[in-house]
């Protein structure tokens, strides 16, 4: 499946969140990741993030798509990550 993950973590935990997300997805913008991921790895990522997040302060939003055939990605301005996942 294809996902877009956005997070907002407190200053003390944001570095950990960045490191965990980079293991599974492609970094595209501050606190924004996207990419193909299996359901098992997505579940694992959510568990890893949940292990250190403060649920009263931090948040994670995940948009998931069964396929990306009907999606379009447009970047205006500086490109933070040159890796293009769309063919």
Image (spheres, helix red, strand yellow):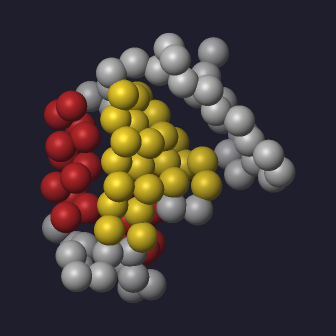
x 79%, y 46%: residue: 76
Residue lying furthest front: 70
Q: Quadrant of the N terminus?
A: top left
Q: Quadrant of residue 73?
A: top right
4 or 45, which is in the foreground?
Answer: 4
19 or 53, which is in the foreground?
Answer: 53
x 22%, y 82%: residue: 56
Against 4, residue 20 (above or below) is below
Residue 8 horizontal side relative to residue 85, left or right: left
Give the percent coordinates (x, y) of residue 75. Answer: 74, 41
x 71%, y 36%: residue: 74
47 or 59, which is in the foreground?
Answer: 59
Q: Quadrant of the C terminus?
A: top right
Give the percent coordinates (x, y) of residue 34. Answer: 48, 40
Give the percent coordinates (x, y) of residue 9. Answer: 39, 74
Residue lying furthest bottom: 12
Against 8, residue 86 (above or below) is above
Residue 40 horizontal side relative to residue 57, left or right: left
Give the percent coordinates (x, y) of residue 39. Answer: 21, 31
Q: Quadrant of residue 16?
A: bottom left
x 19%, y 46%: residue: 44
Residue 23 in sight here: no
Residue lying furthest right: 77
């Amino acid at each position: 499946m294809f996902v877009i993950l956005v997070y907002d973590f407190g200053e003390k935990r944001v570095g950990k969140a960045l490191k965990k997300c980079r293991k599974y997805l492609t970094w595209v913008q501050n606190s924004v990741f996207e990419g193909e991921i299996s359901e098992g790895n997505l579940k694992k990522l959510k568990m890893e993030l949940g292990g250190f997040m403060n649920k009263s302060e931090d948040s994670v939003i995940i948009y998931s798509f069964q396929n990306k055939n009907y999606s379009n990605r447009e970047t205006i301005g500086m490109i933070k990550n040159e890796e293009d996942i769309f063919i």
